[in-house]
Image (tube, rainbow, N blue to C red):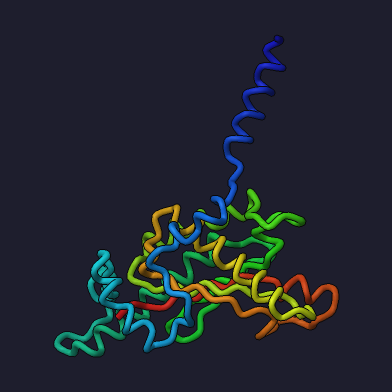
Amino acid sequence: MSVYKYILTILCLLQCACVYHSPNHEDWQQYLYGASFTDMTDIAKTAKMPVYMGNGGKIITQSGELSTNMQYGDKQTNDNIALTSYMANLEYELYDKLRKPGISVQRAGTDVFVILVRDAIMQPKIADISNDGADTLHTISRTLKKYDATFLEIAGYTDAIADKNAAYSLSMDMAQRVGVYLATHNISTSRMFIVARGATRPIAAQDDIGRLTNRRVEIKISPAR
């Protein structure tokens, strides 16, 4: 074998070794043990807090992200400043790292939303995460490990299709695949809420182009406090 062919062979093997495949579907329950399959409401977060703290979770005021603008002696003001600063820094870091087509980062109040259009993270005709998607989720997981005083709601959405049961199943599949990826990359499931929302809450028109946008996974990141 020539040196050129040898190098090509090695490169192909390395490329194949880097391909991500979701674990077998029957094992997902094991990977997602500890996740909540419900909306991430304030009541749900409060109920989950003992489990979260018992698994090494912490609240933002324990994270060391203290603002230089804190007012001495006013704990509530200090806590609010620390929380706002923490979530703003999280937003800026994700925004800077995720400048890719089909991906957006937004903040609403103290919550940060990462919107992942399906085609940006999954293979076109196969229900599995693509290589680009794995790279994106790896970036997200690394950032979430740094900003670990947060809860995560992973919500799957589809476009408007006639069969509501199919829409629910497809959206749950996407949400769980993302949850499994994060869980296998050391994001604690005690932080996770996983939900399927089917064709509800469209963010684009239900035409040919809009449908591609409505098929998505949204990760809502909320401060633990």
Q: Position of residue 49 (x, y in %)?
A: 29, 78
Residue placed at 43% from the left, 86% from the top? 41
**Residue under the image location 71 percent in, 73 percent down:** 166
Q: Position of residue 174 (x, y in %)?
A: 61, 65
* For residue 179, side relative to residue 167 (left or right): left
User: Which percent across, then down, holds residue 156?
Assistant: 60, 73
> For the view shown, which residue lies furthest in the left direction?
73
Residue, far top: 1
Judge whether 147 appears above or below 68 on screen: above
| Location of residue 137 in the rendering, given as x and y in whole percent from the top left corner | 54, 57
* Residue 64 in view, yes or no: no
**Depicted 219 relative to depicted 28: above or below:** below
Give 57 or 179, whichever is nearer the viewer.
179
Left or right: 16 as drawn, with respect to 219: right
Residue ranking furthest to the front = 26
Residue at the location (62% across, 67% down)?
116
Quarter of the rendering containing residue 9: top right
Q: Nearer the viewer, residue 90 or 165?
A: 165
